Every structure is written in structure tokens, then in C-alpha cells.
Amino acid sequence: MVIKTAVTIDWSTKTKVVYLGYFEGFKSVDFNSYGIPKPFLDAVLASAKDKELSGKSGNQSVFVGQGKHLGQRIVLVGLGKKDALTVDVLRKLAGEIGRNANASKLSDITIAMPKEVGELDSSWVGQSLSEGIGLGTYKFDQYLSKKEGKETPLKSVTIVAEKAAQTAIKKGAEKGVVVSQSVAVARDLANTPANDLTPKLFVDYVTKLVGKAKGFKVTIIDAKKAKQLKMGALLGVGQGSINPPYLLIVEYSGAANTEKPIALVGKGVTFDTGGISIKPSTGMGEMKGDMGGAAAVVGALNATMNLRPKKNILFVTPLAENMPSATAQRPGDIVRAMNGKSIEITNTDAEGRLILADALCYTVKQKPKEIVDLATLTGACVIALGNSASAILSNNEGLVATFKGIAEQTGDRVWQLPLYDDHLELLKSNVADLLNAYEGRLAGTSTAAKFLEQFVDGTPWLHMDIASTMSSNTTKGYTPKGMTGSGTRNLIEYILS
Ligand SMILES: [Zn+2]
């Protein structure tokens, strides 16, 4: 998608459709300021007078041109209340605009916003508009034999803005294109069914994605190597499946090799039946997305390949399929993670933390500056936060502040939950160093995070539980129905910060 900027709207017949933003409780001056040609403007003002224009967020009204503007259209798009304007409001609006443009098979569109938008950071304005269009028009249709509108026809977007803001808007918008493409990578991975995305196929996908890109190194740890490295927790989860587990590491060198890397670790359970502690059948198909954490890490890898931040970064994805079978791990089994800690399995469905345990041990050995892990980890997170936010838990308040700040811009919301020593008490075993899961119903997200903390060896670390935000059952704003790729944009902003 090509992003252009302009100072004024080109009202010549070359411009087919112009999207104009306006607020709830608007004044006619809002419309006059766009320089709308007379016949159009009269129609708009008449509708405004008749109170047909609400300005409510997501509201769209179409005006068709007459006379010499025949064939042209104005789409008025509501921005909601003026004092509630944020970059995420723009992002959501852009998602709606993108789908509207695609449905109308438009190859280029013009977007103009009221002057109040100029009070927001210009690069974020540009980024949110292009990001919203990219995210909102995402489709997962490679399994449909009859594809409808497969080719996204939208090729060029002109953003109208003051001259002083144009450079920043364009730069932001170009970044937004990369970000939305990277989220599409994460969504594609999470939406791909488990018969086409085993741990091995995930490894193959990433290896191909990285290709021969300069500054990247791929390390693949297969089951045999994992055994040598004593990754008993990862192997225990994978042993029930004919598709063996892997630990995949991609190293990126964007800074001097004396600089410690930051590490992104993502849970990659390519399918989670629950194992012997099998899940109920309703909705189990969603568990093809139980590698959403790993998908977000690969999305961030894709952005790194394009934006090349001056950082050293480790991308770490433990991969396994959690199946019930004659060889599956049993409740009561005791496994030993790479750092020597023994774990009594109370529930084989608490497998994500097991594969993450070994991934974190491996990561810590690489001496990173900070670790951020993402995982579709606990049902308790969904109970606590609904679908409105991901949970963050950390041993480092600085990292918490960083992610809270990032999420305010990305709209990919996070909410901090506590990590108390009490939570470790709940993980006490009679026969091993730890239980893999507390068997009661208390603080499920916190106890899971407390478990993970036992494997980070004091490294500054933040855990993000994205179980609550992994999928959407409606199409709204910039989020189409299906897997959302949540966490990806927060990771990208983090590595660029
Ligand atoms: Zn599970």
C-alpha cells in the first residue's frame, strides 16, 4: 500500500471517494473547513440540519456527487466525542474505512480528519491510519475454494494534513504498513489449523521467513538435542504426540555484540487437547491458536526484518503438540526442567508453562538484559479480564511501566495482575520442587506466572497472558473475526523503543 500526503483535498474527478472524519455534536464549520464543493456541501449541511449525522464512532454516511462531481462520493465517518479522541479511535475508524473501501473495490482513497486530530502525535496519526486499514482488511481465506475479493484492491491512500505534519505522518504510516503486515503473519499462524501447522511445520515456516536475511541466525533444537540439554518439561509435553517438540531460536544482531540482547519468548502449543487431563469438546478447535504467543514473537521477528532496530534480540519459541495417547504424560508424573527443578504434573492441560520453563532456562543462559514472554496461558485470565485486555505480571516495575505506556498508543490493552510470594505457596508439592498447576480455583493467572518466575533466575522479566485477547467472535474496528494476533504490536513497539 502506497501512502501519500496532501495539504488539501483534490476535488477533481480523479478523486473517486473521500472519507471525512467528524465528531459527535459537530458544527457546520467542521464540514466547511474541508473545502467541500458547493453541491456536495449543500447536501451534507441539509442532512446535518435534519440530524441525520450522529458523528458516533463507526457511523458512516454516503453522499453521491452531482453535475461535474458525478461519479464522486463523500463518506462521512463518525469519530465519536471530541474529548475522547485517541490514536486508537483513528485506528478503529481506519479499519472500518478499509473494509468499506474494499467492499466498494476502490484502488485509491483520500482521508481527511478534523483539525483536532493535529493535536495528536503526527507519526502516531499516520501509523494508526495505515495500521488500522491493514489490520481491518485482513482476511484468512486460503482454505476457501471460492474466494471473494481475494485481492485487496486498495493500493494507495492519500492522507490530508497540514504541511508541517506531513513528513511525520508519512513516516508513521509507512511503519504502520509493516506493523499490520507483521500482525497478519501472527494471525495467519494462529488461524492455520493444527493439521497444517505442527511444531516441525512451524519451524519450517520461520526458517523460510528468515531465509538468508543478514544479521539473523536460526538455531533448531529438536527432541534429540533437547534430551541432551535435559529439557524434561518440554519433552514431557511433546511425548504424547507423533509430531515431536522443538525449541526454535532466532538471533538478531542489530547492535554491537557486547550489548546484551532482549529476549522475546512465545508459547507455541500448536494444538492443545489438554492431554490426559482432556478439555471439554465444545470450542476445542480454538486450541489451534494455542501458539498465539509464538505467533506474536514471529510477527515481531517479521517487523525486525523490515525495520532493523539497532538492538540485539532473541526470538525464542518452544513448540509442542499436547495430545492424549499411550505415550502421553500422566498426572502424577514428575519431570525435570533444564535448570534441574523437578515438577509434579497435577494437570497435563497446564502444559504451556512447562514448555516455557525450558525455553526460559535456555534463554537465561544466553544472558539477556530483559525477557518478555507471551502465552495463551490461563482460562483464569479470560475470567478476570474478559476479552478487553491481556494480563501482565512482572518482577520489574520498569518493564510494567514500559508496556503500560506502549499499550496506551497501540490500543492492545494490558492490565497488571499481582505476583505475590503467596502464589508460590500454592505451588508446593510433597514430592517435587513445584506443582505444575495449583488444583484449586484461586488466582490462576498469578500462580501460572509465579511458576514461570522460577525459571528466569532473577532476570528482569515480564509475562503477558494473551488467553483473553487471542480471538474475536465479531468483526469490529480493526479486528476481523478470528485470531487477533494480540500482543504482536506491543512487542514491536517494545523492540523499537
Ligand atoms: Zn492446556
Image: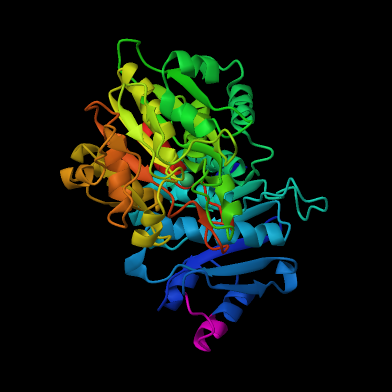
Please state the total of marks drawn on the protein image: 0
Residue 68 image-quadrant placement: bottom right
Residue 33 image position (x, y, % from top left): 46, 67
Q: Residue furthest left?
A: 421
Q: Residue furthest right?
A: 146
Colour scheme shown: rainbow
For the question of whether residue 268 can be seen, the reply is yes
Residue 47 image position (x, y, % from top left): 56, 83
Could you tell me which residue is drawn at 43 percent across and 73 percent down?
29
Could you tell me which residue is drawn at 58 percent across and 80 percent down?
42
Q: Is residue 116 left or right of residue 13?
A: left
Q: Is residue 152 left or right of residue 351?
A: right
Q: Residue furthest bottom?
A: 50
Query: Which quarter shows the N terminus?
Result: top right
Q: Which residues are magenta?
A: 45-55
Q: Is residue 415 above or below residue 39?
A: above
Q: Is residue 279 above or below residue 225?
A: below
Residue 368 image-quadrant placement: top left
Could you tell me which residue is drawn at 38 percent across and 71 percent down?
81
Q: Nearer the viewer, residue 430 or 402?
A: 430
Q: Nearer the viewer, residue 5 or 215?
A: 215
| 52 falls in the magenta region | yes
Q: Nearer the viewer, residue 455 or 258?
A: 455
Could you tell me which residue is drawn at 40 percent across and 62 percent down?
386
Residue 298 image position (x, y, % from top left): 51, 33
Q: Is residue 116 above or below residue 403?
A: below
Query: Which quarter shows the C terminus?
Result: top left
Residue 257 image position (x, y, % from top left): 35, 10
Q: Nearer the viewer, residue 237 or 123?
A: 237
For the question of whether residue 11 can be seen, the reply is no
| 77 falls in the magenta region | no
